[in-house]
């Protein structure tokens, strides 16, 4: 029995360590007829007019603009842009999930920051500052808060573990990009959307990883979806 308990304890420890490795899994869908970049000037604007003047939008536009800059595009810097990039994002109200499990695990939070600096990628031209909030549980929920001899679970049977019910909320987050010429009535050159599902409804936590996902293999094969997994740094 002692040997069996040690095996169970080792399995739980290994499972716990494995669960601490975090990643954001996004499904990316793209349609495009986008030529290779050749130094075109771009300006990023909200697809939803409700985000005009939003500091949150400014932060996400910075992430998108930096990614586009790495591909060879240039910020308009107040000049007439060649291309308009429309940016949209959001998160739904979530879906309640109920599951049974013999143990409970949580995920560490992501915290990040951007120092204040001039943002040339969008039209507002102001200084913005962002500080990512610390989340003790990365996905915004928890399975349990009691600990036993093995550091997990709150009830004990012959083997030290009894199944318990876990309740959490699962959210769908999305990021959408449209690129089109700066001309009246011009057709879109690129339409892309990344969707991810998780227990965190705070977009500022996951947006850096969703932006990385949508620009992985950019512009991608038109008309096909791709699953992109982005690892979250351990010290984030």
Image: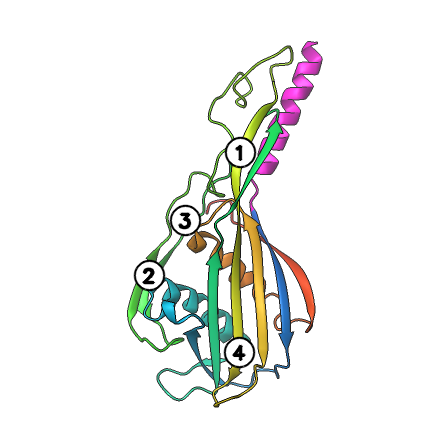
- The part of the chain drawn in magenta is 1-22
Q: Is the magenta stretch mostly helix, strand or loop?
A: helix
Q: Residue 47, how many percent across, how many down? A: 45, 72
Separation of residues labelled 1 and 3 (CA atoms): 25 Å
Give the class, few, some or many, for how many residues have Cα within 10 Å of label 2's Cα (few <14, many ≥20).
Answer: few
User: Disc 2 designates what residue?
Assistant: 115
Separation of residues labelled 4 and 1 (CA atoms): 40 Å
Question: Residue placed at 37% from the left, 48% from the top?
Answer: 133
Question: Residue placed at 70% from the left, 9% from the top?
Answer: 1
Q: Are marks 4 and 2 in contact (CB under 8 Å)?
A: no
In the picture, measured across the screen, residue 216 lies left or right of residue 50, that is: right
Secondary structure under tag 1 reads strand
In front here: 202 or 168? 168
Give the class, few, some or many, for how many residues have Cα within 10 Å of label 1's Cα (few <14, many ≥20).
Answer: some
Q: Quadrant of residue 224?
A: bottom right
**Label located before the other in sequence (4 or 1):** 1
Judged by depth in the image, the label closer to the viewer, 4 or 2, is 4
Label of residue 111 in the image: 3
Label of residue 179 in the image: 4
Give the class, few, some or many, for how many residues have Cα within 10 Å of label 4's Cα (few <14, many ≥20).
Answer: many
Separation of residues labelled 4 and 2 (CA atoms): 27 Å
Q: Do the residues labelled 4 and 1 touch (CB within 8 Å)?
A: no
**Label located before the other in sequence (1 or 2):** 2
């Amino acid at each position: 029995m002692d040997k069996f308990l040690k095996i169970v304890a080792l399995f739980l420890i290994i499972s716990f360590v494995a669960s601490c490795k975090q990643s954001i899994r996004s499904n990316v869908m793209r349609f495009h007829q986008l030529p290779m970049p050749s130094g075109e000037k771009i300006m990023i604007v909200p697809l939803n007019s409700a985000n005009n003047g939003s500091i949150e939008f400014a932060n996400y536009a910075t992430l998108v603009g930096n990614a586009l800059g790495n591909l060879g595009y240039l910020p308009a810097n107040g000049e007439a842009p060649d291309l308009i990039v429309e940016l949209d994002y959001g998160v739904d109200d979530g879906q309640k999930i109920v599951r049974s499990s013999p143990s409970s695990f949580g995920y560490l939070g992501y915290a990040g920051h951007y120092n204040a600096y001039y943002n040339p990628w969008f039209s507002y031209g102001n200084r913005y500052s962002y500080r990512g909030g610390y989340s003790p549980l990365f996905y915004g929920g928890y399975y349990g808060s009691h600990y036993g001899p093995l550091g997990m679970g709150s009830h004990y049977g012959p083997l030290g573990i009894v199944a318990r019910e876990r309740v959490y909320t699962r959210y769908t987050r999305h990021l959408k990009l449209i690129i089109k010429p700066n001309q009246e009535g011009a057709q879109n050159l690129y339409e892309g959307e990344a969707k991810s599902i998780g227990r965190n409804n705070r977009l500022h936590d996951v947006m850096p990883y969703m932006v990385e996902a949508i620009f992985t293999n950019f512009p991608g094969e038109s008309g096909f979806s791709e699953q992109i997994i982005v690892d979250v740094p351990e010290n984030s």
